Image (cartoon, rainbow, N blue to C red):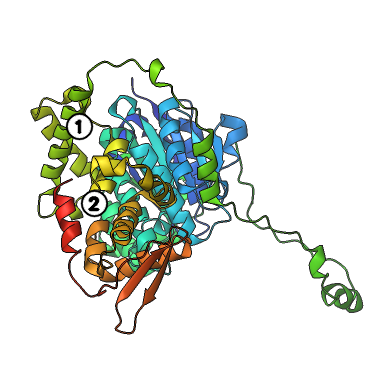
Amino acid sequence: MTVAIEMGLTTAGAAAAMDLEELLATRLLVQGNSGSGKSHLLRRLLEQSAPWVQQAIIDPEGDFVTLAERFGHLVIDAEDHTERGLQVAGERARLHRVSTVLNLEGLDAENQMRRAAAFLGGMFDVERDHWYPMLVVVDEAQLFAPAVAGEVSDEARKLSLGAMTNLMCRGRKRGLAGIIATQRLAKLAKNVAAEASNFLMGRTFLDIDMARAADLLGMERRQAEAFRDLERGQFMALGPALSRRPLRLNIGPTETSPRNSTPRLMPLPEATLEDARAVILAAPPADASRPQRRPAPDLLEQLRAAKAAAPEISPELVEVAVSAEELAERRDRVDRTLRAVLAAPDAGFRAIGVLYQEFVVRCRIEGLGASVPDLSEFRRMLTHARAGLGTDMAEDDSWQEVTLRASILPDDMQGVFMMIARAAKEGWPCPGDAAIARAYGSHSLRRAQRLLGYMEEQGLIVVQLDGGGRRIVTLVELAWATAPGDPNGDDQPAEQMASVTSV
């Protein structure tokens, strides 16, 4: 059954319909300057499709939270949740097929990117059984997939751009249909924009944006001037879900409204200059009257408390299906399989998802189909392997504190932290920038330096240089310290390299 969404009227007065099933397969790009009606268009699309398909909205300004009252969307205020919490929320939203609005209002650009990437990653990484059809709308997409580096860190840009690329390039097979809206096509990463097959182009004035819009719609350059003449709420449509030829349409009305409507002219209040001076230049209130900010939660203490509160399972209650010898033999085979995956020259620079796929295939070849670890367990194993920790060592009580501290960091940083912790515990020289970058999956030495800076900001390590310019890293509270190591050195200590190959 074909589901047609009424977006409005064409200039000829005919109904302008969008094929929802075709949209799910081909994605959509919306472009228009501020005030062109992009948000109104997205709201119309979301309202019309809400009864038919699950939705997720990445909302940097909190414009779409009003959908909750009328259509039952769950509003998630990203400011109140950690990146890990939002990743889990994204997974659960897909598992339970709940439409959501991720409200990023109140966060700076870097934290908006990090939290949006975590939420998108959670939706992307769910198991195949839960790949239900879903519209994923990203407003102001140039913030999350910028064409050039901005003021945010390279790490935040990498996370956000990777999540957006996954959504637009690989999301279709997972049931995710990306709908991205931007004010400036020139500011949007080309590899993200290029994956859309449907386009709705609104009013724009800059030559570079008009030229790109005309190219996407298959129009001649001389026809690009038409984008300047579009009224608010008018868009040029093209694509298999819309029209096979460029078609001008007017977006219809919506049932809900944004919290912040368009400013209207209104008369100024009648006040004398003396009254204004008294109000505006009055003495500021005392500092004591300012609301006190709540102290930031101690994440490490929360993790300790959660660990202490976890119920212990009595060994008598566990039903042993296989003998201890068989379990040990299976674990050894899994470890050998992991070693084989990591032995590839480029293993350190490949995405975890790709490594996991190869790992699963190798496990099946080894006859371990029923014992293959899931993706989350594979991440933990990979983190320990890259740190040079064997299975027995990782399960030792002395490493539980290190594992607990590492869990504060993003997943892709935990292996680096544990690698440094291993060097500190064994008294080995501090790994060089090249070794740290390789453990992080990057070729950038500057990124390695920023990683250490970030860990130091989190209160996990202290970085010092001795008189010869060699680096020493000390783990806070544990008082483990590495031996001095050359930051410009290319490799890890020989002892640690040997332990990695014998995981």
Residue 386: mark: 2
Give the residue pinned by disc 1.
331
Q: Please state which amino acid type lies under the numbered disc 1.
A: Arg
Which quadrant holds the N terminus? top left
Res. 498 in view: yes
Q: Secondary structure at mark 1?
A: helix
Residue 126: mark: none
Q: Quadrant of residue 213?
A: bottom left
Query: Whole-Å distance between the Cαs marked 2 and 1?
Result: 18 Å
Q: Please state which amino acid type lies under the numbered disc 2.
A: Arg
Query: Looking at this view, is 315 or 65 the one in front?
Result: 315
Residue 267 position, x and y percent, is 79, 64
Q: Residue at x 33, y 84 (%)?
A: 467
Mark before the other along the chain sequence, 2 or 1: 1
Q: Nearer the viewer, mark 2 or mark 1?
A: 1
Taking 477 as reference, is 344 left or right?
left
